[in-house]
Image (cartoon, helix red, strand yellow):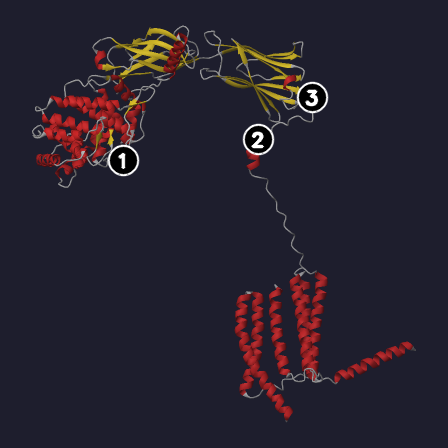
Amino acid sequence: MARDLGILVIVVLVLAATCQSAVVSPVSESHRSAALELFSPAHGSYGSLEETYEALKTFKVLGIEKKHAIRTSSCASVADTLKSTSSALKDFFDALRVNSILKCELNSEAVRGTQSRLKDSLNGASSLIDFYYSIGGLVLLKEQMSEVDVNLGDADRIFRSIKALGQSDGRWRLSSNNPESSNNAAGIALEALAGVISLATPQIDNSWITTLKNDILKLFDGIERYDDGTYYFDEKHVGARGHQSPLSSSASVVRGIAAVAAATSETLNLPGEKIMGLAKFFLGVGVPGSAQDLYHQIDALSYLENIRESTPLILSLPATVISVTKKDQLKVRVSTLLGSPAPTLSVRLMQIFVSGSKDASVIDQELKFDAVSGMHVLETLPKNIDVGSYIFSFEVIFHNPEHKKTYVSGGRTRVLVHITGVIKIDNAEIVILDGDRGSVENQKKLKLPGDNAVALSANHLQKLRLSFDMSTPFGNAFKPHQAFLKLRHESGVDHIFLVGNSGKKFEIILDFLGLVEKFFYLPGRYNIQLTVGDADMENSFLQPLGFVELDLPDAPEKATRPPPQAVDPYSRYGPKAEITHIFRAPEKRPAKELSLTFLGLVLVPFFGFLAGLVQLGANLKNFPKSTVPSTFAILFHLGIAAVLALYTLFWLKLDLFTTLKALGFLGMFLMFVGHKTLSHLASTSSKLKSV
Amino acid sequence: MGKSATTSDVHALFHSLRSAYAATANHLKIIDLYIVFAIVTAVIQVAYMAIVGSFPFNSFLSGVLSCVGTAVLAVSLRIQVNKDNKEFKDLPPERAFADFVLCNLVLHLVIMNFLG
């Protein structure tokens, strides 16, 4: 039973040691440069008044002086908004917010008009947003224009109306129609209620303050938590104002709490651990990427910094990698959220856990405070700390006991620290041992890390032994994450072996008799490569050592083939060789003179035909004499000539379709004319016959 | 003796053929002349092809076939026009000539297409 309990305790300690090692750092120059980059005005202004306010507030908190550039345009915009009768409630609110930072000169008539508009809206308000804008506007007016009278007459009714929208779990609904409640709305409601209290003085009811305190505590009950101690507010539903990120919801709640704290002089009894957790959440975001996220982060941090009763202090390490060889010193900084110096305190290193194991040692060493740099320095590392990864556990001790009540330091802060160093490797040698007798055949000394090119040869009856010693700068044994010996055959087949160790001595013996089958019976040159590496080793190396010519017996028939090597992608998918095309040699054409001779020869029979016709006494006596038939006859011959001309054109340049089209027309003409001519001839000859 | 008899027989044969041929009508002789002209042109084309090779074979074919085709059509015209031919007694020669012209035109269209 006791043993089980003991194991349980150890497990819990291990869990406690493995988590909670996130380190956050306070607001720094990177936030300032991000603000300048994200909030860059386009054409001298930021667009809407809301964006202008976000930019101005962020610059103000970060201490960036940049207001002058946009002051004139923003003031003009503010004045216009307050004067105009068509401005919405939100516009009044945004304009007054911008004015609270810029402090423009405002027309008193416009101010009076704004005040009456806000009061009217407040009287007619029903949704949380309306209450928030009108009350917020009136509070801002009261701060800026002391002569304006904005005391609320029926503060009680307003307080109750806002409270009516609250839920039992501490969240608020946006309006009575909307059943969904959110943390974002809770933050807005708290700001509005705090505004009612500040406007309604001195008539406030003390029970209101108590109610608000209870609401805040209920809200904190619904806070969410990460394992490393970060707390944040998130929304369970997508609200009417769109999806709110945890950053904007948490920032809204922080604004609400800060408003309540500012409105009353009583202490709110906020849970210090949760305030610290919220601070860690905002700082843990790092540098946000969007302007609105940066505004939420910086705005919330500024409010958290100024909370009276539990101001968070951040313990951060500028460097978490300490080199023993370079004799680095561990430096710790304690500051407020925005980077301001903390009150006088001391930092003690309480415990050191070895990362990844159960070892822990109690140290309780105080760090020396260096006033020049503002850092607490660990001058010497504890004695049993060597190269490796550790979790250091720090605690903050206040010099003034009063500070313990007003500051929150977050208890023990755990940080993952890497102690690195140059590892010494000596006595490195590679040896070929002869068979069973173990006698040394060939021994070569190696320089690690360094250039080595050994040339060894062995057969399958021999063994190869590689050995070296590794020790830390303090002389202790060191086991690196990686210690591999790789043998690579000339065909590309790799074999990797782990180098084992006992204490400081690392040794591997390759017995080739047993490895013959693993090597696929491939004889030849094997390149040797040694890899020794660790995250905390400053001189990790991956080096070729040389080669060994292995003489292995022939493979039996059933031996496994070596795996196919990957084809070099450039050779397979790269460009192929140029193809030289071989074209068919063009046909040999005859000589021009020969062709022309034969052209002449072909025409000779035609002339022979004409001569023969003359000799036979062919004549045109039967050609019709009278007008009409002769016209038809002439047209007939012309038609045939036209068709032949069409054919020549067809051969020269026309295509078949055009030719056929033309031929169709010509053919019809020719038919008609031919019919006429031939029928005339036929009738003439029949007349002759009958006669 | 036999040789001179053969040669004299050949002479006598030629003589009788010539005289018989002279008796044919003139228009038939014109058609015969046209046929001879076409065939001689075809022969010259074949001789040219024998010398230079048949590279644009389609052109050679088209040329030779146009000559042969027109000769064939002329032969059929001659048959139809011949008065001694009992088969085509009722066919007017103008009609035969119109057929000849039409078929020639179609033949030459195809030839021109194939000439390339």
Looking at the rendered image, the disc whose residue lies closer to the viewer, 3 or 1, is 1
- Marks 3 and 1 belong to one chain: yes
Identify which residue, A496 or A178, lies in the foreground: A178
In the rendered image of this protein, does residue A659 appear above or below residue A199? below
The residue that appears at 21% across and 14% down in the rendered structure is A406
Looking at the rendered image, the disc whose residue lies closer to the viewer, 2 or 1, is 1
Name the subunit of mark 1: A
Mark 3 and mark 1 lie on one chain; the one further toward the N terminus is 1
Question: Could you tell me if residue A64 is visible in this image?
Answer: no
Q: Secondary structure at mark 2?
A: loop
**Which residue carries the number 1 mark?**
A242
In the rendered image of this protein, does residue A49 appear above or below residue A476? below
Query: Which picture quadrant has residue A488?
Result: top right
Number of other residues with Cα within 10 Å of mark 3, as a class: few under 14, some 14 to 19, many 20 or more: some
Residue A596 shown left or right of residue A671 in the figure: right
Residue B77, percent across and down?
67, 78
Q: Amino acid at mark 3?
A: Pro
- Marks 2 and 1 belong to one chain: yes
**Which residue carries the number 3 mark?**
A553
Residue A127, percent across and down?
18, 35
Name the subunit of mark 2: A
Residue A16, percent across and down?
36, 15
Q: Amino acid at mark 2?
A: Ala
Identify which residue, B35 or B107, lies in the foreground: B107
Number of other residues with Cα within 10 Å of mark 2, as a class: few under 14, some 14 to 19, many 20 or more: few
Q: Secondary structure at mark 3?
A: loop
In the picture, the disc for residue A566 is: 2
Looking at the rendering, in which quadrant would you find the N terminus of chain A?
top left
